[in-house]
Image: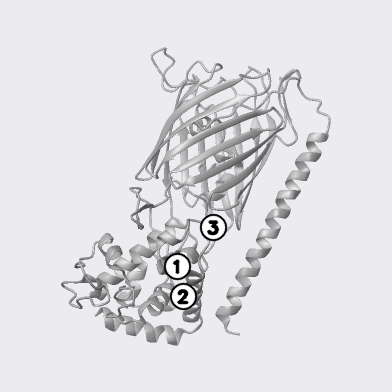
Amino acid sequence: MKLGTKTEVKNQLNTLLYRKRGWLLIASVLLLVAYLLSQTSTLSNPPNLRPEVGTRGLGLSGAFISSADDATSPLWNPAGLATLQRGNLIYDLSQGAVSLAYPIKPIGTFGVNFLDLNSSDRFLVEHTANPIGSFELGNNQALFSYARKFGTLQLGASTGYSRAPYHGSLWAQNYDVGVVTDVNSYLALGVRFRDISGVTIRHQNGQVLQTFDQQLAFGAVLTPHPIIRWHNRFDITTPGFGTSVEVGNASIMARFGSAFSFTDKTLPQSWSIGFSLNQLGKQFHYTYLNHGDFDRKHLASVGMYFGGEQSISQKSNDGTQFTSQRPQITDGITTQPPVAESAIQTRQSKRTDSVYKSVQISKEYDIDVELMLAIIHTESNFNPLAVSKNGAAGLMQLMPAAAKELGLKVPQYKNKRKPNFDPNIDERFDPNKNLHAGLTYFKMLYKKHLNNLTLALGAYNVGPGKVKIRGPLISRGKRYANKVLKRSQMYQDNATQMEVDLKRLEAVLD
């Protein structure tokens, strides 16, 4: 059996083990939760819940448990940090909260959150004309979090210290855990368990000032359409329900939500409306929160992304959850959102450090040269004049419509199988332009499919309209992806063959 086949079987086995391990971990967490909830609580009555912070999370009626995807994730579900591909910094103007998170591959994502940092407890100035809301004075908290992804399962935990809004309050340690998993491309589920041991905050004289009882909540997010997300939250320990709908794309998203409480100890109903902007790696979130306990109902936060993303390589086949940088799809052709992200960091092989023009192009697009060669070999076998029975042409076998979307000049053909081979008339037959356009297209698909290399390759072959964001792939797409990956592995194992094909491509490009 060839090495590529062994690698494929090994990957399939690892995926299967991850799935089984994931369900085992979920079952273990649920059993732990059931045990802890069965214990008699000696803390306060009625329950005193840790305040929830975060402009976007509050704007989603707290239904951010199974969809948390930024630096504020630990305030709702620490497992949400595992979705981050870049660093993220968010400052909540209305609540004095600073959130910072950064992924360190392959270790996981680390995050810190500091609450109530405003000295006067108001943003800029305490004045009736200042519309930005406020958080209860002195409800300080510092959280340190970690999350990691295992297949489709995200696990996260937080620990930190909290103090009550009283002078002389001491600090008390708290713990949180969370789980998020994608059931399919339409449904994600999450579980959050806060203050596992319960938290009792005392005054310097020993008096009990405040207690934070254990809180269990479940979340579910439905995505019936790429621009529509329906968030839901179910509180178990303090019966309640929160629901919110977000509509929009990577650049702008509007939301409306409402929360309901089924106990007379909290406000029975509240609602919120707001929006989020994401331009050039910068974020702005706004929420109007119609909640009786809040005197200042306008909430706002700002943020930014920084750092690089994971490389496109043969080993980069672990999908990630929907993020605010999702590419958009127009007429079946993926186009980049207007978010200026730093390029995916490359992992070039040492043996390709040369003056080859093709190597420089692969570096320009931050794609492993082995993978680039494998795609070209599978598509056209390095023939710049290749034409498929469907009318795809050139090195990267681009269809006329896709090539036009990518900026190439292509005439209108009555018969796509009989194109004009003049590169001045049909630029698909210009090897350099074809290669640049093909790599741009593939990179778009890679991001659209959340860094899942297998899905991106399959979509390149069968068309983006036939592959959902998280799959599955049809049989033809699977065969194509496996063929490319095997060829890429062969290049990594056989430097001589790789050098031969590099020279073939170089001759074509020259």
* Quarter of the view holding residue 190: top right
Going by the numbered disc 1, the residue's amino acid type is Leu
Q: CA distance from mark 3 to mark 1?
A: 23 Å
**Which color scheme did the rendering employ for the protein?**
one colour
Of pointers 3 and 1, the one earlier in the residue sequence: 3
Quadrant of the drawing holding the N terminus: bottom right
Res 356 → quadrant: bottom left
Measured as percent of width and height from the top left, residue 10 is found at 63, 72
Vertical position of residue 142 compared to residue 433: above or below? above
The answer to whether residue 285 shows anywhere in this view is no
The disc labelled 3 sits on which kind of residue?
Answer: Lys
Q: Is residue 43 left or right of residue 61?
A: right
Circles 3, 1 touching at the beta carbon (< 8 Å): no
Q: Which mark is residue 317?
A: none
- Coordinates of residue 223 in the picture (x, y in percent): 51, 45
Gap between marks 2 and 1 measured at Cα: 8 Å
Determine the secondary structure under disc 3: loop
Mark nearer the N terminus (2 vs 1): 1
Q: Is residue 156 found left or right of 354 in the rendered image?
A: right
Number of numbered discs overlaid on the protein picture: 3
Could you tell me residue 233's position as x and y percent? 60, 35
Tag 2 near tag 1, CB within 8 Å: yes
Q: Does residue 96 lie above or below 460 as drawn?
A: above
The residue where tag 2 is placed is 484
Question: From the viewer's perspective, is the residue at label 3 or at label 1 nearer?
Answer: 1
Tell me the residue that label 3 is attached to.
Answer: 105
Q: Residue furthest left?
A: 424
Describe the element under mark 2 as helix, strand or loop: helix
Q: Amino acid at mark 2?
A: Val
- The residue under label 1 is 457
Reply above or below: 64 against 226.
above
